[in-house]
Image: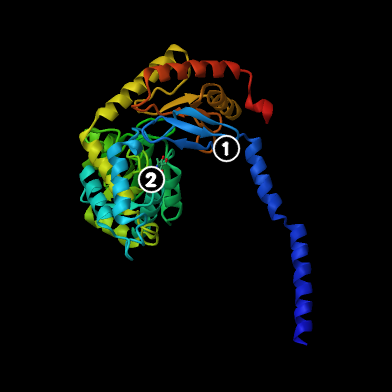
Amino acid sequence: MINNKLKILNIILFNYNDRVGKILNYSNIFKSSINKLKIEGRYRYFNEIERKAGKHPYASWISKSKNNDIIVWCSNDYLGMSQNKLVVNSMIDSVKNMGTGSGGTRNISGNSSAIVNLENELADLHSKEKAVVFSSGYVANESALSTLLNILKEPVVFSDEKNHASIISGIKKSKASKEIFKHNDLNDLENLLKKYPEKKPKIIVFESIYSMDGDFGDICGISKIAKKYNALTYLDEVHAVGMYGKKGSGLAEELDLQNSIDIIQGTLGKAFGTMGGYITSSNIICDTIRSYASGYIFTTALPPALANAATTSICYLKESDKERKLQQKNTLLLKKYLANQNIDFIDNKSHIVPIMVNDPIRCKEISNILLNEFKHYIQPINYPTVPVGTERLRVTPGPLHSEKMISDLTIALKYAFKKTQNINFKKHA
Ligand SMILES: Cc1ncc(COP(=O)(O)O)c(C=O)c1O
């Protein structure tokens, strides 16, 4: 009797699944979403490369049939610190002494002296009372912002329109009202702030260097307005830490404005050459984030070896500005060579040199030519990372690129631009 009932149930379920399968073909839905990306020229192909310790900016490009030496021009290891001998040895020694993993969350057995030292070092770097370390800069922004916004009572967040995806995600995860101000536009920001009563909690969120255009956020102007309207300031210094300021703390330090910013966020994964993210602020703000942010509480802590390597890198760059100086020299050199060849780039004040192509297919094609014919690797940057029609090659010259490499790259770029001059995205669409 029971067997018969089960058989009938199975037949009903089978028919149901069959019917749903016909109506709703999940694979086709995913396939058409991928096809859309391919048609729009923004399907992401990842180049597989193997970096070589001590040889930066050289790496091996692992393609199907061959193994080639290439020069990397698009790394966020801006100063080559991931291959700095002191940093490498610090990680190796720590692994030998303490093993590979942290063994738990910060709360449950994962809190090491290495991570506590790292937080102290970061607080000192930014002249703040305290720091909180996260697994990445992305997680730091998402967790810290959503937590702050959820704790304040009915806050309003004022966010620059060019803020990074992690900031947008943190804001979306909160219930805060949001106002998006025009990029770096102090008048627009002030007009939006004026709409709200003095007692309303407010946070202004912006970046010190916008990673795709390489322009600077107006730290001075925004912090003055924040003071006038009693708003908190949250500054993402991801692309500036290690790179600017006497100690390598970032742009706020260079402008002597660290005290004007309430919360500074950064990464250990770019100029510091390791991995992880953080915020630095007052004791009470850090304690609040530490106590409420689920992206901090419910995840495995950074391994001690990673924390020690990051601390070594930060301490090294506090003392040495050799790498920063060489990097800046090479940025100016590249800009000079590009200008001489009439290659269009955004002439900003930062270390990021965006070479404008303004067409997704051509951008990919130029990148392919550079890699296949000249062994120069620059990843094409397309929508949604940048707006449609502003596709580019984002070049980050480092201290270890030579003048010969810069000159060779410029000649290769000139050739690739010429070879692709008839490629037009609209023709392909
Ligand atoms: C402005 C900005 N903030 C945050 C992040 C995330 O940092 P991480 O790479 O450490 O996750 C990035 C990443 O590129 C970024 O560009």
Compared to residue 404, the image places residue 428 above or below, namely below
Q: Residue at x 38, y 59 (%)?
A: 300
Compared to residue 126, the image places residue 320 above or below, namely above
Q: Nearer the viewer, residue 388 or 158?
A: 388
Q: Dot 2: within a 10 Å radius of its alpha carbon, few (fewer than 14), some, or many (20 or more) residues?
A: many
Q: Which mark is residue 45?
A: 1
Q: Quadrant of the N terminus?
A: bottom right
Q: Quadrant of the C terminus?
A: top right
The kind of secondary structure element at disc 1 is loop
The kind of secondary structure element at disc 2 is strand
Q: Position of residue 284 (x, y in %)?
A: 24, 57
Kindly tell me whether mark 1's CB lies below 8 Å from ligand 1: no
Residue extending farthest top: 340
Q: Position of residue 42 (x, y in %)?
A: 59, 36
1 vs 2, front mark: 1
Q: Is residue 225 visible?
A: no
Q: Which mark is residue 158?
A: 2
Dot 1 amino acid type:
Tyr
Residue extending farthest bottom: 1
